[in-house]
Amino acid sequence: MGLVLIQGSESLLADRAISQIISKYPNAQISNLYSDEIEVGVITDNLAPSLFGDQRLVVIRDIQDLDADCSEEVISYLENQDQNLILVLWHKGGVKGKGLVDKIKKLEPQIIPAEAIKKDSEKSDFIRNEFKSLNRKITTEAVQALIDSLGSDLRELGAACSQLASDVALQKVIDEADVAKYQQGRVESTGFDVADAAVDGKTAEALIALRNALATGTDPVLIVSALASSFRTLAKVSGSSKSSNSYELASSLALAPWQIEKARKQLAGWSDNGLVKAVIAIAAVDADIKGAASDPKYALERAIMTVSTAKSTR
């Protein structure tokens, strides 16, 4: 039914692409698979034809990290695809996993770029496109002011665009003064703000961040994705030696040293039972926001409370 290849390391663009694809198939059964959690057989099970011919959408993230056996499972499926299934594969780029990507490309999938945006000119284009999609105008000086203050993080840039479009009067062209006011005032809560507060066990702050994020247009799917990403990092780091240098661990854990240091600090106060409870709650809300719950936002609030209070579980 469909094959999509997302290429690039920019997680915001990849997450948005995945959310847009999911939104096109509201009745589809969604499966989200992460390469670092996949065991042999899992891909085959998820891609096996449905007995009832249900419409399904399977997302496999970070396919560059699949081992040889799991890559073969993907290849086997590609040789005999299910007409009722949309398969979305995200490859972060580089030579790792290139053999699998080359085989995928031979089947002429829909390719969605998600390359990291590094040049100021590319960031300017990103900001202008954000405001264009929001039906707003922004001055050249304001674009540069945003880049100067938030240019290192695409998620923060996207959040700032949403906040400014929401806060500044509709008839007004957004200018440098508006950006300066934004910088001094409330910064929009993103999914990772929500996740950080929940990981720290700060329930009230997590709920406020969640409501701010939802109010300014952050997709609930991205909030759950941020939660899942944060807890996957905690799980990776919790199983490593505390005496190991973060720079030595970076390669084996596929994390940046600063992520390892941050996770080590966040793990303080978390028990194994608490982490398990939080992961179960995240898995449940992931299903809830994709159709299992009548009120996804309420389900998300309930999950945030469960996750943040799980820190005290022994």
Image (tube, helix red, strand yellow):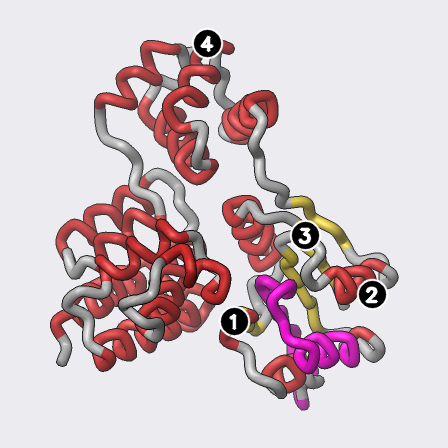
Q: Amino acid at mark 3?
A: Gly
- The residue to which callout 3 is attached is 94
Judging depth in this view, the residue of 275 and 243 nearest the camera is 243
Quadrant of the rendered image containing residue 265: bottom left
Q: Amino acid at mark 1?
A: Asp
Cβ atoms at labels 4 and 1 below 8 Å apart: no
Q: Which residue is mark 4?
A: 141
Element carrying mark 2: helix
CA distance for labels 2 and 1: 21 Å
Instruction: Point out the stretch of residues depicted in magenta.
Output: 51-77
Which amino acid type corresponds to the residue marked 2 in the rendered image?
Lys
| Horizontal and vertical percent position of residue 153 | 43, 36
Left or right: 235 in relation to 27: left
Q: Nearer the viewer, mark 3 or mark 4?
A: 3
Q: Earlier in the sequence, mark 2 or mark 4?
A: 2
Q: Nearer the viewer, mark 3 or mark 2?
A: 3
The correct choice, above or below, for 126 with respect to 227 in the image is above
Residue 36 bears which disc, if any?
A: 1
Helix, strand or loop at label 3? It is: loop
Q: Residue at x 17, y 65 (%)?
A: 268
Q: Earlier in the sequence, mark 1 or mark 3?
A: 1
Dots 2, 1 in contact, CB < 8 A: no
**What residue does disc 2 label?**
103
When the figure is inspected, residue 279 is found, relative to residue 233, above or below; the finding is below
- Report the mark closest to the observer, 4 or 1: 1
